[in-house]
Structures are given as C-alpha cells and as structure tokens.
Amino acid sequence: MSEDFLVVKNVSKSFAGIQALKKVNLVIRRGEVRCLVGENGSGKSTLIKIIAGVEAPDEGEIIIGGKSFRRLYPIDAIREGIQIIYQDFSLFPNLTAAENLAFNYLLQKKQRSVNWKDVQKIAREAMKNIDVTIDLNRRVEELPVADKQLVAISRALLHNARLIIMDEPTTALTRKEVRSLFQVITKLQREGISVLFVSHKLDEILEISERVTILRNGQNVADGDRSEFDRNKLIFHMTGREIEETRYQYVPRHSSETPLLRVDGLSRQGSFANVSFCVYPGEIVGITGLLGSGRTELAMALFGLKPATRGEIYLNGKHIHIRNVQDAIRHGIGYVPEDRLTEGLFLPQSIGNNMVASVIARLKKKMGIIDPQKRDHHIERWIKTLKIVTPSPTLPVRSLSGGNQQRVVLAKWLTTNPKVLILNGPTVGVDIGSKTDIHHIIRNLAQEGIGAVIISDDIPEIIQNCNRILLMRRGRIVEEFSGDQITEEELARKMIGGDGSEPVSSEMAFV
C-alpha cells in the first residue's frame, strides 16, 4: 500500500450557524487519483478551501506528508506542494494566455523588464503538458470558456506540485479534450503526484478514479475503491434517492404542422456556413459537436449576439430578421448562455432582480416606475415553478448553488414567454440531482408547446433529452440522427470523425 500524502481527520466547519462539514474524513495516497463527489451544497468546496488554507476548520486535523496542522494557511499548502484549480479559473482576464501561464515565473525573477521570448517559451511548454493548442496571445477575457479552463489547468501543472486538486476541471471541455486531460493525470500519477478530482460527471468519475469519496449534506456517506461503485450507486449516494434516466418522447401534434423555427442556409464568415434545420412545437432538438465546430456561434447568431451574414430565419412560417438581441427577444427567442457566471447573471444583484432583468419594460407603470406587485408576482411564480431553493429572493444570486443559479437564468428568459428557447450547455457545472430537475423542466416546457434547442457536447444529455440530434463539424451540419436510434458510443465516434484522429484544437477550420 502506498504512503498516505494527505489525511483529513474529523474536520467540521460551520458558517453563521449552518453546518457545512461534520466530522469529514479523507485520505489521499501518494500517486493516487481520488474522486471527491457530491451535489452542490454537499461540502466539497468547503473541504477544498480548508485543504488549501483558505478556510480554517472549527475542529479536526489535517496531516500532510506526516506533518500535522490544526489549520493551514495558503502559503503552508503551497509549500507542501498543494495546487488548486478552482471552478472560476482564478485567471487575470486582462492578460494574455501566455502572460497568465508565465505570471508566477515573472514574479520570481523580479526583473525590471520582461523577456517576452521566455514568456512564450514557458506558455508553449505548459500547453504541451495537456497536448492542446490555443492562441496564447489572446487576452483571457476573449477566450472561450473551454480555453480558459485549459489555461488554468496548464498553469497548475507548471509548479512543483505533489497534490493537484481539480475542482470541476472538465466543465467546459469536450470528450476529446477530457481524454487529453486524463492522459496528463495518468502521467502525473506515474511521477508520484496525487490528484483529487472533483466532478459532477459520473462517467468521468468511473473512468479516472482509483478511489471515490462521496459527501452529502456535509458528511461522509461512502468511501471505497472505484470497483465498488457504478453509475446508479453514485447517484443514490450523492442524492439519497433513486433517479431513473429516461429518453424524451416527442409526439408530433399534426403531420402538416408548420415549423416553429426554420433556418435556411444560415452563414457567418469564419464561424459557420450553410446551416439549415427546423424545430417544431414540442420538439427538443440537440446540436452537438467538438469545440470549434461552430455550435456556440450558431446559437449566438440565432439570438442576435453575433448575427448571421447570410441565410434566412422563419418563425411560425414568417420571415424574420435578427440583427441584435432586441430583435430576437421581440420575436420570442430566449437564450440560456454557456457561461452563466459571466454571460447569464448579474452576480452582485439579487435573485429577484436577475429573474426580471429581461422584462423590466413590461413591469413599468405609465410614469416609468416599476410596478412592485407585478415584479413580485413574476418572481414568486418562477421561484415556485422552477423550485429555486432560497430563503429570500432579495439575496445576491451569487449566494445560490450552481443548480439554483441555472434555474434563475432559465427564469430570466421564461418570464419573456419565449416561443423558442436556445439552451447552450444548460447543465454545465450542475450536480446530478439538479441536472435531472433541469432536464424535466425543459421537457415540460416542450410539452407545453415551446420549441427547445439544446447545444451541448454532454452526450448522455443530448441523447436522453433530444428527439433529433444535429452534428456539427467545421461550421457545418454534417449529419442528423434520431435521439432514440443512436447510442452514446456511436455519437461519440461520430463527433470525433469516426476514427479519433482529428487534432485537438480550439481554432476554427473551414473548407
């Protein structure tokens, strides 16, 4: 048996009387890949912060490499070789990818001037560790979510780490990029570096872990070898309930029904070309593809964020023009963006303000003053309908769990009574229980007559919830499948071109 590197003994932590952790235990061996699993609010993040020295435990002990700590400070954790990749990436948005990667090196050198050749060299070597290619000279704020994640992972691997904690590291990565990351993890393991892998994605947990620790409501509920768990056991331990995974059944209302949304030959130079498809009332159409396939750019065009330069869009058979977001909203199109934290929510604002942000004009009286009764009615309705868990809608939206934040984003667009709802990565970073609930919400909306478009590379999500699936590659729709006639394995092979030989890159490439 390998030597224990980190031992967490009976650690407890409460915040304002709320028990976040209660007598939690965790052991990570040298060179071990352990998965920490639990729903949002289970205590995972609090435990990580205590290991990182960001939070002090109320009681308990932490042992690193045989040294005992009643509490750690961040500098202690770093000195002991602990590196954390947080969910929010902790990157400098105004610096380039290369500058972010070389930042610590530049600080250590204490030079009055920067050697840009060194910066580029460090950055290139860092990206080689995970075998991907991104534009290192672009500012981080301009990068897609997946590329930001890759920069954060690469930066952590630059340091002399003995334990790397990855908090939802694959949230925005495609399957191909996940495989590349797993190769890096395997390489680290061979070098004796431990990895604590925190994820909501059950298939990844079962693939990469050697041992699994499961938390629920701040307590240990299961701990053991990977061989002791399967998907159903993980779900049960995480949620405390049985969750049946079913496929969405679409029943056409009329054989001659007009499509709710029809897109003909839609194009935007450098993003996608000649895209045509339709969505009928009650349908959930899935659009999938690798990072760089054009799927997100297509969604943004349909919502007017980056309008198409050619092609036609029809709503209920009527030709419409979408030149901006206001056009899209006026025609009844809603959009749940890929990154809820930076694109979907006003984090400092209250839950209620976020929910009514898209319908402010409708809530105003004649004098331009917001009608408080109308406002409260909207907020109360959607909190109840979407089962948003909060003691008060006046609390800042950042106080909510990921699943509840995503419900608020849904509420923001459902208040507009959309005819078509485009959902880009609707359950990214959401735990399995909330994920199931959100899928049920989308299905219920479709059954009420909304046309839904789910854009995702989460293959189980696409197959279970979409009656039709469109595959994009290099900016074009290349194949269409029936949701109930394709397996996860078949769709995964189709996404990567069948043989897995397509290079991993976030760069768009069109023929």
Image (tube, helix red, strand yellow):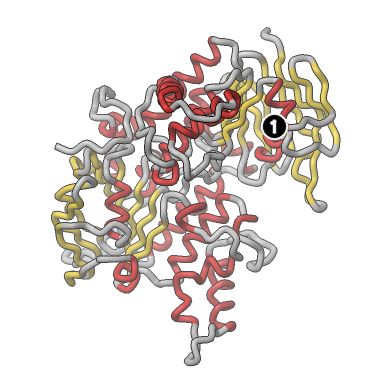
Q: Is residue 162 left or right of residue 341?
A: right
Mark 1 sits on what residue?
A: 52
Q: Residues within 10 Å of mark 1 (few under 14, many from 20)?
A: many
**How many discs appear?**
1
Residue 317 placement (x, y as % from top left):
17, 70
Name the side, left or right, on which 463 lies relative to 317.
right
Q: Quadrant of the C terminus?
A: top left
Residue drawn at the location 18% of the way across and 51% of the way down = 275
Q: Nearer the viewer, residue 108 or 209?
A: 108
Which quadrant of the view contains residue 288?
Answer: top left
Q: Amino acid at mark 1?
A: Ala
Q: Position of residue 484 (x, y in %)?
A: 30, 43
Quadrant in which the N terminus is drawn? top right
- Residue 230: image location, x then y, percent: 54, 28
Task: Name which residue lies at 66% across and 39% down.
Answer: 45
Q: Measured from the top left, where is residue 114 in percent x and y?
A: 48, 29
Residue 180 in view here: no
Residue 87 in the figure: left or right of residue 126: right
Asked whether 204 or 335 is in front, the reply is: 335
Q: On screen, 260 above or below 154? A: below
**Residue 170 seen anywhere in this rendered image of the structure:** yes
- Horizontally, residue 448 falls left or right of residue 404, namely left
